[in-house]
Image (cartoon, helix red, strand yellow):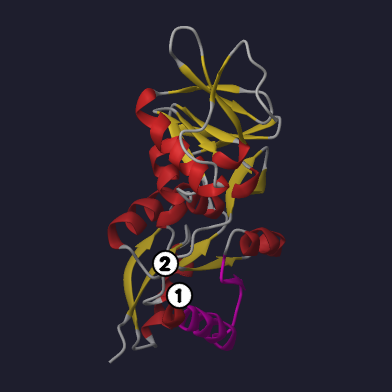
Amino acid sequence: MHARLRALIVDDEPLARSNLQVLLQLDDAIDIVGECGSGADAIEATRKLKPDLIFLDVQMPECDGFDVIELLGDELPPAVIFVTAYDEYALRAFEAGALDYLLKPFDNERFALALGRAKQKLSSHNGAEPQRPQRLAIKSAGQVLFLRLSGIDWIEAADYYACLHVAKKTHLLRRSLSELERQLDSNTFCRIHRSTIVNVDRVRAIESNNAGEYEVLVEDGTRLKLSRRYRQHLQSRITSMSGVPAPRRLVSHKESPTR
């Protein structure tokens, strides 16, 4: 017997939630675990109920569908279907990892197609190793940016945000550093301080000064403080990626690091 799929309905319009509920109740393989009228409630419900599938409205006050995706991060369920009356968000939705995009008003046949896709994805997802995302969705200046993780140089904590440094630009992500660290590939990203994570591919050198303190020199010339507790871990990560025997050479500020 196949396990029943747990679905969460998120829409700020009661009638829209009711319509989705009626359609889902026609399928014996679906359990509706909750309904939410706001994005903030959706985040809380997702973390608590852990649904397999979310039907997610795009436009909601204060916290919209893209906010929900950004804030949930790796807690996002494996299947997300956007449901909205606005077609201009379709491309963004698919770039953000949505499985399907239901444009209101839709008929029973179109809904069944979307649900079938969700069932197929969840069937292949069960038992498989979770895949790490390759991009992050970030809301900025009224648009949604999709940053490739491989392009991030380093990340620093900024209160309740994480500040991503990409080339000479910075982007704020509404997620704590610890939460983001769990989502990142530990073979590529390494914590070097309680408030800093670095992309190991961007490390040019590890330097020590006369006071015995350590710094990481990033490819763009930025110097980042390296805590003693994280130094050995960083060196082992560099060794595993580059094949250079540990410990990696330390240089002082007076020396010019080898490029």
Residue that protrudes farthest toward the bottom in the picture: 1
Quadrant in the rendering for residue 59: bottom right
**Image-based side of 172 in relation to 178, left or right:** right
Quadrant in the rendering for residue 105: bottom right
Residue 250 or 137: which is nearer the viewer? 250
Residue drawn at (45%, 48%) of the image = 186
**Image-based side of 8 in relation to 207, left or right:** left
- Looking at the picture, how far across and down is residue 255, in whole percent? 64, 15
Task: Identify the image quadrant of the C terminus.
Answer: top right
- Whether residue 176 is visible to the viewer of this picture, yes or no, is no
Distance between the alpha carbons at the discs numbered 2 and 1: 7 Å
Label 1 Cα neighbours within 10 Å, binned few <14 / some 14-19 / many ≥20: some
Q: Mark 2 belongs to which amino acid?
A: Ile
Residue drawn at (67%, 24%) of the image = 221
Q: Mark 1 belongs to which amino acid?
A: Leu
* 69 vs 258: above or below: below
* 3 vs 183: above or below: below
Magenta stretch: includes residue 227: no
Q: Secondary structure at mark 1?
A: helix
Residue underneath mark 2: 9
Quadrant in the rendering for residue 165: top right
**Image-based side of 51 in relation to 89, left or right:** left
- Looking at the picture, how far across and down is residue 220, in whole percent? 69, 28
Residue 103: image tag: none
Marks 2,1: beta carbons within 8 A: yes
Residue drawn at (54%, 42%) of the image = 244
Task: Identify the image quadrant of the N terminus.
Answer: bottom left
Residue bounds of the magenta highlight: 98-121
Q: Secondary structure at mark 2?
A: strand
Residue underneath mark 1: 20
Dot 2 or dot 1: first in sequence order is 2
